[in-house]
Amino acid sequence: MLLSMPKKKTALTSLKAQKKQIEDLVPMMPPEKKKMPTKWVWVVVIALGLIGVAWMNKGMVVAAVVNGKPVFRWDLNRVMTARYGEQTLEGMISEQLIADAAKSSGVVVSKEDVDTKVADVLKSLGSNVSLDDLLKYQGMTKSDFENQIRLQLTVEKVLGRDLEIADADVDAFIAANRATLVSTDAAALRQEAKNAITSQKVSEKLQPWFMELKDKAKITKFL
């Protein structure tokens, strides 16, 4: 028993020595590097994203570059608003008033209606005139042209739904305007004449009807 005691002391001394060695090593380990705060990481990511979006959509900022000098989009918008803003705004207001009136009346203009009207317009101009020729002459895109046709058809449907055109009126119109009508088939000729009479009567009703719409509407302009 007396011989085994030194072994326990030796083992205990060894454990203490190892613990001391570990404690001595810990302060010598390099301190942990501070991490960048999360909010700054997001700031950098968002900034880079905005720069990327601005580059991809540079046309939204710069409209043109002349001899290295930019023409900014906001300057273009300012000039266009000063020159054409009032006229353009009035047109947009008119379109909205007509659209609201059509909706309240249950009037819908389909794509087929627009396509048929476009074909009629081209037919009236002769076989040598294509849609591209017409668009070039009018200085507008196909989308703009179709929107105008849709607006015209909307007005005709709203104002022409209660119109009654007698056969005698159709006969009289054909007799007076035969040279300007393009249809050769008898039924098509009468339909063309009827459409022309409808357009005339709608035109007569358009101004007072639209003024009434505008008077009843609540319009606030900030331009």
Image (cartoon, rainbow, N blue to C red):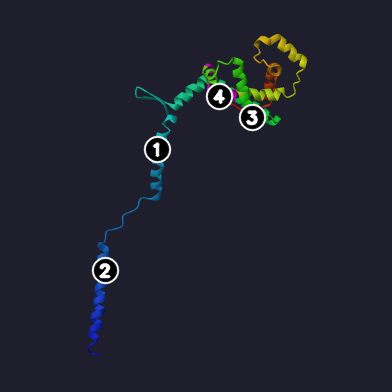
The residue to which callout 4 is attached is 144
| Residue mark closest to the camera, 3 vs 4 | 3
Q: Please give the label number shown on residue 184.
A: none
Callout 1: 10 Å neighbours few (<14), some, many (20+)?
A: few
Q: Identify the residue at horizontal 24%, vertical 69% (top origin).
A: 21
The residue to which callout 1 is attached is 52
Label 2 sits on what residue type?
Ile
Q: Is residue 142 magenta?
A: yes
Callout 2: 10 Å neighbours few (<14), some, many (20+)?
A: few
Q: Identify the residue at horizontal 67%, vertical 28% (top origin).
A: 102
| Residue mark closest to the camera, 3 vs 1 | 3
| Image height of 59 relative to 122, above or below | below
The residue to which callout 2 is attached is 22
Real-space CA distance between mark 3 and mark 4, rounded to the nearest whole angstrom: 16 Å
| Residue mark closest to the camera, 1 vs 2 | 1
Label 1 sits on what residue type?
Gly
Callout 4: 10 Å neighbours few (<14), some, many (20+)?
A: few
